[in-house]
Image (tube, rainbow, N blue to C red):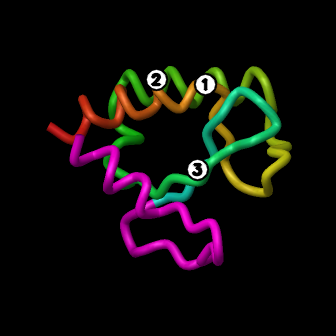
Amino acid sequence: MAIRQMLRRSLSNVRRSTEVPKGHLAVYVGESDQKNRFVIPLSYLNHLSFQELLCQSEEEFGFHHPMGGLTIPCSEELFIEITSYLSR
């Protein structure tokens, strides 16, 4: 559950910061029009399970991402499950 709290901290309903800490990447996750922003370590990009998410993103959006940043078209629950596994 700690990863869920860490990922949720990157969300701000009042004000979203455009700053991303060094060594991290902001991604938008969701299957509907409502997408949530998560800040993840760059090291996740090396993992096969995360690369599969990136392939899904490429297939759906190509290089045009509607949120202006990298958009991952999966459920928030799946994303949290994958990132929880990667954080171990």
User: Measured from the top left, where is residue 40 in percent x and y?
Assistant: 41, 53
**How far apart are labels 2 and 3 at the CA level?**
14 Å
Label 3 neighbour load within 10 Å: few <14, some 14-19, many 20+? some
User: Measured from the top left, where is residue 33 in percent x and y?
Assistant: 82, 37
> Label 3 belongs to which residue?
27
Residue in view at x 80 percent, y 45 percent: 65
Give left or right: position of 19 versus 82.
Answer: right
The amino acid on which the numbered mark 3 sits, given as a three-letter code, is Val
The quadrant the C terminus occupies is: top left
Q: Give the range drawn in magenta.
A: 1-24
Badge 1 element: loop
User: Measured from the top left, where is residue 38 in percent x and y?
Assistant: 51, 53
Residue contact between numbered discs 1 and 2, judged by CB atoms under 8 Å: yes
Residue furthest front as drawn: 14
> Label 1 belongs to which residue?
74
Residue furthest left as drawn: 88
Q: Label for residue 78?
A: 2
51 part of magenta stretch: no
**How far apart are labels 1 and 2 at the CA level?**
7 Å
Q: Give the mark, 3 or 1, whose residue is nearer the N terminus.
A: 3
Residue in view at x 85 percent, y 46 percent: 66
Give left or right: position of 18 versus 42.
Answer: right
Badge 2 element: helix
Residue contact between numbered discs 3 and 1, judged by CB atoms under 8 Å: no
User: Measured from the top left, where is residue 46 in percent x and y?
Assistant: 35, 37
Q: Quadrant of residue 21?
A: bottom left
The amino acid on which the numbered mark 1 sits, given as a three-letter code, is Cys
**How far apart are labels 3 and 1 at the CA level?**
12 Å
Residue contact between numbered discs 2 and 3, judged by CB atoms under 8 Å: no
